Image (cartoon, rainbow, N blue to C red):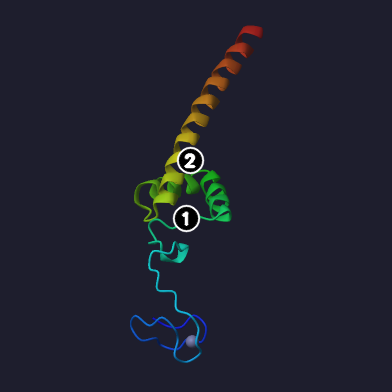
Amino acid sequence: MYCENCGKKLNEGADVCLECGHKVNNNQNTFNVQNIPSEYKPVSMWGYFGYQILFAIPFIGWIILIIFAIVHSNINVRNFARSYFCFLIVLGILFVILFTVGAGAVAITA
Ligand SMILES: [Zn+2]
């Protein structure tokens, strides 16, 4: 472990840095985003925004979406890709229904 203040290497279990006197934080249970394993790391708002734009690209984005939904190492990205996949399916079904109804209406009025 190294001193947060001066960067000097600390002795194991030291409460204070012998170099600069900075208090050492020995509490290993302190919640810190930096300590979260990469597979659980939160995705930033701009991260989600970027993925959303990427997944909205027809064909290339959809292939990336399916790959991410199956094999991405981060659970948050994986779940977001799965959720977006379901959203695209619902959108596709709605599109087919509206197209069918619209085509039917045109056929009747024509
Ligand atoms: Zn120090």
Q: Residue at x 50, y 83 (%)?
A: 22
Q: Position of residue 101 (x, y in %)?
A: 57, 15
**Relative image position of residue 102 (x, y in whole percent):** 60, 17
Say if disc 2 is inside 8 Å of ligand 1: no
Identify the mark nearer the N-term, 2 or 1: 1
Is the Cβ of the residue at disc 2 closer than 8 Å to that at disc 1?
no
Residue at the spot 58% in from the left edge and 50% down from the top edge: 49
Q: Which residue is mark 2?
A: 84
Mark on residue 73?
none
User: Residue at the top extreme?
Assistant: 108
Q: Quadrant of the N terminus?
A: bottom left
**Compared with residue 79, is residue 92 higher up or lower down, i.e. above or below?**
above
Q: Residue at 38% across / 53% down in the picture?
A: 72
Nearer to us in this view, 73 or 99: 73
Q: Nearer the viewer, mark 2 or mark 1?
A: 1
Task: Name the kind of residue labelled 1 in the image.
Answer: Pro
Name the residue furthest right.
Answer: 109
Q: Is mark 1 within 8 Å of ligand 1?
A: no
Residue 42's mark? 1
> Mark 2: which secondary structure?
helix
Looking at the picture, does residue 68 appear above or below residue 38? above
Q: Residues within 10 Å of mark 2 (few under 14, many from 20)?
A: many
Vertical position of residue 60 compared to residue 31: above or below: above
Which quadrant of the figure has residue 82?
A: top left
Say which of 13 and 77 sits in front. Answer: 13
Amino acid bearing label 2: Tyr
Determine whether the residue tagged by mark 1 lies in a helix, strand or loop: loop
Q: CA distance from mark 2 to mark 1?
A: 17 Å
